[in-house]
Every structure is written in C-alpha cells, then in structure tokens.
Image: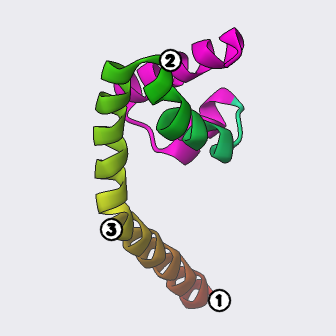
Amino acid sequence: MHEQIRRRCVRLGKMLLDTGLTVRALAKATGYSKSTVHKDLTERLPNVDVALSEEVAKILAYHKSVRHLRGGEATRVKWMNEMKKVGSN
C-alpha cells in the first residue's frame, strides 16, 4: 500500500474518533468520496493500525445501529416542513 494512503487512513481514523462524524459527514469535511472514506476505514485501516481500526469499528457499528432512527427523523422533519409550506400558502 502506498504511504500516502496509509497516512490518509490513519488521519481519517483519528478524525472519526475525535469528531464522531458519520462517513458522509467525514467525506464532506475532508473532500474525499464517501466510498473512499468507507473503504479506508473498514478495509485498509486494519492493515495499517489494528488498535485504531478496532476503535473506529465500534463507532461505525454504533452509526449503523442508529441509522434507522436518523432516517426516520429526517423524514419527520421533511414532512413537517412540507406541512408548513402548505399551511402558509
């Protein structure tokens, strides 16, 4: 693996631990694609830093366990905004 990719994996892993951002938010903050961030954190990081990858995996597992709640909340907010638009017209 190229040294630049190794450094990127470690940097993304540490950033995830520090901020707790989702993969999408982390990708947006760093300018990398969501696919690159996810692959770096799940596939490449264990080959670079095992201890860091275990901590990252815990956070990613938590995000996966609550994603249905985030989606439901986003839908609720969307429809509340729609109803406000209809009510104001």
Mark pair 1, 2: CA separation:
51 Å
Disc 2: CA contacts within 10 A as few (<14), some (14-19) or many (>=20): many
For marks 2 and 3, give the one nearer the viewer.
2
* Residue tagged 2: 10
Tell me which corner region of the image, top left, top right, bottom left or bottom right, holds residue 2. top right
Tell me which amino acid carries mark 3.
Leu
In this picture, is 19 found above or below 82?
Answer: above
The x and y percentages for residue 31 are 71, 31
Tell me which amino acid carries mark 1.
Asn
Disc 3: CA contacts within 10 A as few (<14), some (14-19) or many (>=20): few
* Main SS of residues in magenta: helix
Residue drawn 43% across the image and 29% down it: 16
Judge by depth and name the residue closer to the eye, 30 or 78: 30
For the record, the magenta segment spans: 1-30
The type of colouring in the image is rainbow
* Residue tagged 3: 69
